């Protein structure tokens, strides 16, 4: 449920670049994450001094790399993808996260053998193929092949950024149970806000952003950024941290697909029309693949006997072990 709700909130970020077409991806990323940092600072303020006293250098390093890969660079690439390729292609390319995260996390504790996930992942791959065929087939005069190729490349870069972040964040949370999901999300937001503010100031000094223009609606800009900062970043990230601690990495990878499905829903509503046949096929294949992968996590690994499975459940401690005992 936490993964589903996080996906519903994250899906909103695919629509904002359509609404803020007059602004650059850099401006959108800075606006969103400065707002996120302000919310995080307000949440942390009563216990900021105590919490900072518990941080060690490795925590600061983790916050820095997560802020860049999971937030700022990811969102800039996502906005570029939406601008040049559209909402549906970008969301469905990023929908390959379940495939990539599952493959990267296949050796983690709680992962099931890849042979049990081969067919589900094949369905997901087929869904991604459908959406790419549909995208280039309906390029139209507004978006030429070159523009779409740039958008696909940007969306692929966003996919790589967030796949690495999802895996590294899940592992870090499980290794550091001293941080609650709310604390880590707030620290993560504060770090992102500070970095975004520095990037925004540098862009302003060099004239790369914040240029005045009558076509730029700044009230809409800040309204959109405040909404997604609170909904997608503050609340969505906290829900995702809760989910990351309670399921194996290979399963959390599948749950990311809820973001894709909600992004598609919002995109169709914004466009005022339903999915085309290949888009519908892509959605069906993705849903089937994820549902199958979730089911694959419900039982013991194929290569373990019942006795070995009992021993396997007893391995580890903390959240990972509790998740396995809960499944049993």
Image (tube, rainbow, N blue to C red):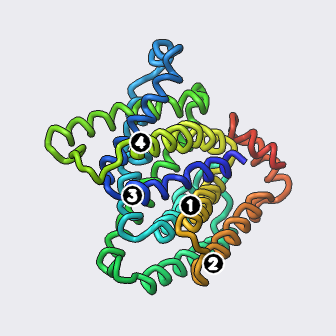
Q: Residues within 10 Å of mark 2 (few under 14, many from 20)?
A: some
In this view, the residue in front, 194 or 290, is: 194
The answer to the question of whether label 4 and label 1 lie on touching residues, with beta carbons closer than 8 A, is no
Residue at 49 percent across and 22 percent down: it is: 42
Question: Who comes first in sequence, dot 3 or dot 2?
Answer: 3
Q: What x and y, as percent, mark residue 326?
A: 81, 44
Dot 4 falls on a residue whose secondary structure is helix
**Alpha carbon distance from label 4 to label 3:** 12 Å
Give the side of residue 70 with respect to residue 6, left or right: left
In this view, the residue in front, 2 or 294, is: 2
Question: Who comes first in sequence, dot 4 or dot 1?
Answer: 4
For label 1, the residue is 263
In this view, the residue in front, 322 or 29, is: 29
Question: Who comes first in sequence, dot 4 or dot 3?
Answer: 4
**Alpha carbon distance from label 2 to label 4:** 31 Å
**Alpha carbon distance from label 1 to label 3:** 13 Å
Question: Who comes first in sequence, dot 2 or dot 4?
Answer: 4
Would residue 224 be seen by someone viewing this image from the given angle?
A: yes
Q: Residues within 10 Å of mark 4 (few under 14, many from 20)?
A: many
Dot 2 falls on a residue whose secondary structure is helix
| Image quadrant where residue 125 sits | bottom right
Q: Residue furthest left?
A: 206
| Image quadrant where residue 155 sits | bottom left
Depicted 163 relative to depicted 315: above or below: below
Question: Who comes first in sequence, dot 1 or dot 3?
Answer: 3
For label 4, the residue is 32
Residue at 79 percent across and 46 percent down: it is: 311
**Alpha carbon distance from label 2 to label 1:** 14 Å
Q: Which mark is residue 280?
A: 2
Q: What x and y, as percent, mark residue 30?
A: 34, 42
Depicted 82 relative to depicted 133: above or below: above
Q: Which mark is residue 79?
A: 3
């Amino acid at each position: 449920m936490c993964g589903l709700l996080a996906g519903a909130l994250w899906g909103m970020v695919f629509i904002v670049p359509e609404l803020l077409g007059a602004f650059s991806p850099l401006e959108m990323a800075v606006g969103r994450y400065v707002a996120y940092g302000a919310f995080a600072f307000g949440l942390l303020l009563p216990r900021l001094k105590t919490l900072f006293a518990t941080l060690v250098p490795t925590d600061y390093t983790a916050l820095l790399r997560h802020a860049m890969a999971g937030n700022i660079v990811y969102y800039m690439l996502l906005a570029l993808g939406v601008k040049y390729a559209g909402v549906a292609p970008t969301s469905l390319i990023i929908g390959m996260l379940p495939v990539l995260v599952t493959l990267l996390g296949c050796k983690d504790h709680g992962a099931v053998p890849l042979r049990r996930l081969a067919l589900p992942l094949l369905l997901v791959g087929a869904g991604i193929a459908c959406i790419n065929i549909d995208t280039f087939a309906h390029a139209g005069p507004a978006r030429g092949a070159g523009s779409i190729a740039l958008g696909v490349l940007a969306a692929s870069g966003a996919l790589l950024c967030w796949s690495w972040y999802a895996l590294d964040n899940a592992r870090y949370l499980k290794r550091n149970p001293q941080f609650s999901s709310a604390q880590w999300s707030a620290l993560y937001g504060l770090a992102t806000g500070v970095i975004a503010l520095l990037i925004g100031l540098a862009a302003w000094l060099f004239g790369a952003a914040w240029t005045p223009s009558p076509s730029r609606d700044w009230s809409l800009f800040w309204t959109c950024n405040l909404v997604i900062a609170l909904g997608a970043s503050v609340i969505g990230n906290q829900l995702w941290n809760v989910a990351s601690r309670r399921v194996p990495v290979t399963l959390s990878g599948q749950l990311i697909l809820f973001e894709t499905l909600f992004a598609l829903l919002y995109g169709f509503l914004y466009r005022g029309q339903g999915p085309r046949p290949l888009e519908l096929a892509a959605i069906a294949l993705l849903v089937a693949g994820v549902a199958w992968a979730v089911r694959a996590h419900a039982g013991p690994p194929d290569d373990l006997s019942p006795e070995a499975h009992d021993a396997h459940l007893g391995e580890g401690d903390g959240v990972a072990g509790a998740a396995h005992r809960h499944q049993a």
